[in-house]
Image (cartoon, rainbow, N blue to C red):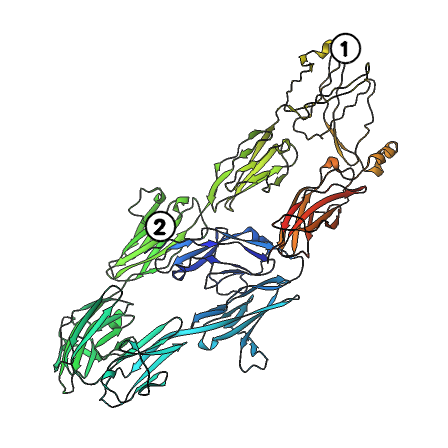
C-alpha cells in the first residue's frame, strides 16, 4: 500500500568555523522504509554519499544527516534540500522545505557545547560505524576519542583511540570501517577549547546474524531413560536462549533442567515428555529458532491446532505407517536465476531410513526427456548453496543456470535395503540486467541529448519500454511533456531515448523497463533541466499618489527558480540613473516571495529609478530599470495661522502650499475672493521647489536691489547642504528661475570671521535622534545594534559619536526592571565608521531596552525610541 508522506529540512544555527548538521526529518511511521540518497544545494548541486574524503567539506551519514565542516559566512547564502528513496517502491521524494544555515560570529570566547551525539549505536558486522560527536564553541574546539579498556592504567579505564586506515576521526565523528564484533564497547568523545571542555559516551553494538541448530533433530527414547538437547548458535549478540515444549515455555524442575543455557537434559523420560522441543536465540533486532522431535515409539492420531483472534482450525493425521518406500511422481520445475529453489521429495512408507537427492550431469546432446539411465548422478549437496534435510527437502540458494539447471532425482531407502526413486527436470530462466545509466548534471534548455538503456543479460526475447514519471512515453506522444522525444530501438537488447531540444517540461524521472519470460526489471534516473530566467511579469514604469501603497511586479520563471533582487538608484530622479543600492525588506519597503516590490506610505523620496534583477546562475540573467513617480496632491501643512501687526506697518502673509505643479493659488479675504493685483498695497511673491529635488523643510527668501549682483546669506547652519535659486522681478512680473546651485557650509572654524561670533551663538547639540534603530540577538550573551544618523538638517555641526544605552526589562509585564540605562560610547572615525555596535556580557534569555543618541562638540541630542531585543536561550 502506497503511503504518502512529507519530508522537511529545518534551519540550523552555527558559529563560523564549526561543524553544522542538517537533518532530513522523515515521519516516524515510514522512517524504516525510507533512506536518504542525496542532498541538493541551491536546487542545483547534488551532494551524494562520500567515501570520507578529508578534503571534502560535506559528509552524509548512513542515517541521512548532512555534515558541513568549517562553516563560512558564504554558507549562509545557500539552501539545502534532502532527497529520499522508498526502499520497496523505489519512489524518490524531495523535501518540501529547504533549510538554511544561520552563521554567526562569536565576539567572545564560548566553551564547547556538544550538539549532535548518540548514547548507543547498533551496526551490522562489516558495515561502517559512524559515531557522531559534533560541537560548537569559540575558539573552534578540538576532539579526542577514548575507548573503555579494563586493562587501561588510567583511573576511568579509558584509553586513547589509535587511528589507522580503518579507524579514523573526521571533525569529531569517529569512523570505523568494516566494523567487527571486537569493536563493540563504550566510547568517549572529549571536546576542548581554551575556555572549557565537554564529553559524551556512546555504546557501540556490532551485530552479526543469528543462526541456531538444535541437535539431535529427532530422537526416540525409552521411558525412564535420559534425553538431552544441544542448542548450538552463532551470531552476536545473543542476549537470551528460551526453551519451549509443544509451544509452551518449559517449566524447569529437578528432572527437567538446564545443564548450561544451551544444554537441556530430561531425566527419567515419561509419556508427558514426548513432542516437539524448540530453542530460540534472541537479541534486540533478531530472533531465530530450531526444533527437535522427542518420540517414545508410540503410534497414534496426532492433531495440530492453529488459531488467532478470529477463529481456529485443526488438522489430524495418523503417522508411522508401515510399508516399503515409494515416491509419488513429481512435476518439472521452472525457476529464476538468483532466487532460492525449494524441492520436496514426496516419499511414503514406514520406516524410512534415509532420503537423498542426486543431480544428473547430462551430456549436451541428450534431451532431458530421455531416461535417467543416460545421466551420471552427483549426490547432493556438492556445494555450499545446496542443503538437503532428513525429511526430503532440498534447498538451492542463488540459483545459477550453468550449474543448477538439469534433472534431479530423489531416492528413499529403509533399513531392509528397499528403495524407491523418481526424478524431475529444473529449467532456469535469467531475468534481464540493465546497465545503469544517468543524466548529466549540466543539462540546459535547447540542447540535444540522448541516453541509452542497455540490457547486458537475460533470456531473449527482451522487450524494452520507457516511462516518464510513471507514464509510458510511447503511448502518450500527444502529451506536451513528451513533445520532441523519440525512442529508437537500436537492437533487441538496447534502446535510446533522444531529445531533439530539451524543454522545461522534459524534467522528471525516466524509467527503462526490460521484460522477458523470467520477469521484469527497471532502472530509473532523474533529469534536471537548467532554464535561464524568463519574464513572467516584466516590470514597467509606475506612478502612485503620496501616502498610498505602490506595488511593482517583477516575476520570472526558470530552473533553478530565479532569485529576484531589487535596488534603487542613488540620487533623486537622476537621469540617467547611476549607481544602484540594494533594497532590503523593511516595514516601508517589502519584497514579496514572488518578486513584487511593495512600498507602503509612499513619500516623495521614494520616487526615482528602480532596478529589478532575476538570476538563477544560468545565462546572464534578466534586469529591467523602471521609473516610479510619486504624485503629491495639493495641500497645506498648516491650515490656520494668525498674524498680529501694528496699524500702518507692513505685514507678510505666507501661503505655503505643497503638491505637484502646476499649482493655482487663490486668496480670499473674509472668505470673499479679491484680486491683490488691483491694489498697489499688495505684492504677491511665489516660489516653487524644483521638481524631483530634495529641498529642506524651510525655504528662505532674500530680496536685494536690482543694482546689486552679490549678497551675503546669513543665519546658515554649519556643515549643512543648501540649494540656491535666483529670480528677477520688475513691475510686469517675475522671470523664470535660474539653475539651482548646490553648496555646503563649512564647520565653525572655517567660517568667515564676520560671522564667527554669530555662529557660536547659534551652535548647539544635535536636534534629532538617530534613525532606523534595529537590534538582533547574536548569542545568549550578545546583541547587535544598527542605526542610521539623524537627519542632516538637525546635525548642527559634525557628529562626533554615539551613546548606546541599554537596560533590562521584564518580558511579560513589559516594565523596566531598572530605571537607568547603561551606556556604551562609540567615536566616529572618518572613512571607516559603521553605525553598528555589539553589546556583550548580557544575561541569557533576557529582554533589553536599547536607545541611541548622537553627540557633537556641544553635547548629546535626543535619544531614539526604545527598541526591545531578547538574547538567545542557548
> Between 227 and 484, which is closer to the camera in this rendering?
227
Residue at point 21%, 73% (across, down)? 304
Task: Give the structural element (helix, strand or loop) at label 1.
Answer: loop
Tell me if I can see residue 775 in this picture.
no
Q: Which residue is outermost to the left?
A: 323
Figure disc tally? 2
**What residue is disc 1 on?**
680
Return the x and y of residue 857 as percentages of the image width and height.
Answer: 81, 42
Left or right of 439 in this view: 845? right
Task: Give the structural element (helix, strand or loop) at label 2.
Answer: loop
Tell me if I can see residue 353 in this picture.
yes
Return the x and y of residue 380 as percentages of the image width and height.
Answer: 24, 79
The image shows residue 20, relative to residue 593, as above or below, that is below
Return the x and y of residue 234 as percentages of the image width and height.
Answer: 37, 79
Mark number, residue 453: none
**Which of the marked residues, 2 or 1, is nearer the chain's N terminus?**
2
Q: Nearer the viewer, mark 2 or mark 1?
A: 1
The image shows residue 265, relative to residue 284, as above or below, that is below
> Between 487 and 17, which is closer to the camera in this rendering?
17
Crowding at mark 2 (Cα within 10 Å: few <14, some 14-19, many 20+): some
Q: Gap in Å between the C-alphas at discs 2 and 1? A: 90 Å
> Residue 383 falls in which quadrant of the image?
bottom left
**What residue is disc 2 on?**
469
Left or right of 27 in this view: 571? right
The image shows residue 119, relative to residue 638, as above or below, that is below
Looking at the rendered image, the quarter that the N terminus falls into is bottom left
Amino acid at each position: 500500500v502506497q503511503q504518502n508522506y512529507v519530508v522537511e529540512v529545518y534551519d540550523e544555527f552555527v558559529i563560523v568555523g564549526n561543524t553544522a548538521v542538517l537533518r532530513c526529518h522523515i515521519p516516524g511511521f515510514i522512517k524504516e522504509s525510507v533512506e536518504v540518497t542525496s542532498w541538493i544545494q541551491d536546487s542545483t548541486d547534488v551532494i551524494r554519499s562520500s567515501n570520507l574524503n578529508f578534503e571534502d567539506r560535506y559528509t552524509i551519514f548512513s542515517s541521512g544527516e548532512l555534515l558541513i565542516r568549517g562553516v563560512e559566512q558564504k554558507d549562509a547564502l545557500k539552501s539545502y534540500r534532502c532527497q529520499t528513496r522508498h526502499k520497496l517502491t523505489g519512489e524518490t521524494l524531495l523535501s518540501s522545505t529547504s533549510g538554511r544555515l544561520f552563521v554567526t560570529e562569536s565576539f567572545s570566547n564560548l566553551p564547547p557545547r556538544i550538539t549532535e551525539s548518540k548514547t548507543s549505536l547498533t551496526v551490522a558486522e562489516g558495515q561502517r560505524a559512524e559515531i557522531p560527536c559534533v560541537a560548537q564553541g569559540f575558539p573552534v574546539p578540538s576532539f579526542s576519542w577514548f575507548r573503555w579498556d579494563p586493562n587501561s592504567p588510567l583511573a576511568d579505564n579509558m584509553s586513547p583511540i589509535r587511528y589507522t586506515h580503518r579507524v579514523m576521526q573526521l571533525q569529531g565523528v569517529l569512523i570505523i570501517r568494516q566494523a567487527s564484533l571486537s569493536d563493540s564497547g563504550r566510547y568517549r568523545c572529549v571536546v576542548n577549547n581554551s575556555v572549557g571542555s565537554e564529553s559524551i559516551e556512546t555504546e557501540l553494538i556490532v551485530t552479526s546474524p543469528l543462526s541456531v541448530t538444535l541437535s539431535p533433530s529427532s530422537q526416540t527414547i525409552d521411558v525412564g531413560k535420559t534425553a538431552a538437547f544441544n542448542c548450538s548458535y552463532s551470531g552476536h549478540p545473543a542476549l537470551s536462549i528460551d526453551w519451549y515444549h509443544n509451544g509452551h515455555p518449559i517449566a524447569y524442575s529437578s528432572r527437567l533442567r538446564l545443564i548450561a543455557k544451551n544444554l537441556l537434559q530430561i531425566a527419567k523420560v515419561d509419556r508427558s515428555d514426548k513432542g516437539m522441543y524448540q530453542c530460540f536465540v534472541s537479541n534486540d533486532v533478531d530472533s531465530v529458532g530450531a526444533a527437535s522431535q522427542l518420540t517414545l515409539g508410540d503410534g497414534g492420531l496426532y492433531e495440530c491446532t492453529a488459531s488467532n483472534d478470529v477463529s481456529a482450525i485443526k488438522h489430524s493425521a495418523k503417522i508411522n505407517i508401515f510399508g516399503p518406500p515409494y515416491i509419488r511422481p513429481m512435476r518439472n520445475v521452472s525457476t529464476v536465476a538468483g532466487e532460492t529453489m525449494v524441492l520436496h521429495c514426496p516419499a511414503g512408507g514406514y520406516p524410512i531410513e534415509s532420503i537423498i537427492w542426486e543431480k544428473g550431469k547430462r551430456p549436451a546432446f541428450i534431451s532431458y526427456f530421455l531416461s535417467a539411465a543416460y545421466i551420471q548422478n552427483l549426490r547432493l549437496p556438492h556445494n555450499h548453496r545446496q542443503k538437503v534435510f532428513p525429511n526430503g527437502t532440498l534447498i538451492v540458494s542463488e540459483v545459477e543456470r550453468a550449474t543448477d539447471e538439469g534433472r534431479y532425482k530423489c531416492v528413499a531407502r529403509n533399513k531392509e535395503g528397499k528403495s524407491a526413486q523418481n526424478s524431475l527436470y529444473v529449467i532456469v530462466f535469467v531475468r534481464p540486467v540493465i546497465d545503469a545509466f544517468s543524466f548529466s548534471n549540466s543539462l540546459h534548455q535547447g540542447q540535444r541529448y540522448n541516453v541509452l538503456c542497455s540490457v547486458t543479460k537475460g533470456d531473449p526475447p527482451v522487450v524494452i519500454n520507457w516511462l516518464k514519471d510513471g507514464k509510458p512515453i510511447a503511448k502518450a506522444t500527444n502529451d506536451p511533456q513528451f513533445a520532441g522525444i523519440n525512442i529508437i530501438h537500436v537492437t533487441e537488447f538496447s534502446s535510446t531515448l533522444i531529445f531533439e531540444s530539451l524543454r522545461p517540461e522534459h524534467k522528471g524521472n525516466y524509467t527503462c523497463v526490460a521484460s522477458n519470460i523470467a520477469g521484469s526489471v527497471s532502472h530509473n534516473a532523474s533529469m534536471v533541466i537548467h532554464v535561464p530566467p524568463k519574464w513572467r511579469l516584466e516590470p514597467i514604469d509606475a506612478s502612485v499618489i503620496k501616502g498610498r501603497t505602490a506595488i511593482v511586479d517583477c516575476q520570472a520563471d526558470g530552473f533553478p527558480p530565479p532569485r529576484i533582487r531589487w535596488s534603487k538608484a542613488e540620487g533623486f530622479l537622476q537621469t540617467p540613473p547611476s549607481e544602484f543600492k540594494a533594497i532590503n525588506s523593511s516595514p516601508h519597503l517589502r519584497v514579496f516571495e514572488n518578486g513584487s516590490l511593495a512600498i507602503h506610505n509612499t513619500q516623495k523620496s521614494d520616487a526615482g529609478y528602480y532596478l529589478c534583477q532575476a538570476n538563477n546562475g544560468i545565462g546572464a540573467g534578466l534586469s529591467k530599470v523602471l521609473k516610479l513617480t510619486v504624485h503629491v496632491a495639493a495641500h497645506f501643512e498648516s491650515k490656520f495661522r494668525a498674524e498680529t501687526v501694528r496699524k500702518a506697518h507692513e505685514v507678510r502673509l505666507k501661503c505655503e502650499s505643497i503638491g505637484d505643479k502646476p499649482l493655482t493659488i487663490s486668496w480670499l479675504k473674509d472668505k470673499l475672493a479679491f484680486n491683490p493685483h488691483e491694489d498697489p498695497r499688495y505684492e504677491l511673491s511665489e516660489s516653487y521647489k524644483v521638481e524631483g529635488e530634495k529641498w529642506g523643510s524651510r525655504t528662505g527668501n532674500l530680496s536685494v536691489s536690482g543694482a546689486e549682483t552679490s549678497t551675503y546669506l546669513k543665519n546658515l547652519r554649519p556643515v549643512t547642504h543648501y540649494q540656491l535659486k535666483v529670480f528677477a522681478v520688475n513691475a510686469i512680473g517675475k522671470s523664470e528661475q535660474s539653475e539651482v546651485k548646490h553648496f555646503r557650509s563649512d564647520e565653525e572654524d572655517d567660517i568667515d570671521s564676520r560671522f564667527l561670533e554669530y555662529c557660536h551663538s547659534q551652535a548647539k547639540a544635535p536636534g534629532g535622534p538617530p534613525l532606523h534603530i534595529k537590534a538582533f540577538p547574536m548569542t545568549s550573551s550578545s546583541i547587535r545594534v544598527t542605526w542610521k544618523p539623524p537627519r542632516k538638517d538637525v546635525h548642527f555641526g559634525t557628529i562626533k559619536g554615539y551613546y548606546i544605552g541599554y537596560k533590562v526589562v521584564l518580558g511579560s509585564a513589559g516594565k523596566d526592571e531598572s530605571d537607568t540605562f547603561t551606556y556604551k560610547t562609540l567615536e566616529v572615525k572618518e572613512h571607516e565608521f559603521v553605525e553598528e555596535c555589539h553589546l556583550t556580557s548580557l544575561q541569557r534569555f533576557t529582554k533589553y531596552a536599547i536607545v541611541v543618541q548622537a553627540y557633537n562638540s556641544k553635547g548629546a541630542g535626543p535619544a531614539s525610541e526604545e527598541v526591545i531585543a531578547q538574547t538567545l536561550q542557548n
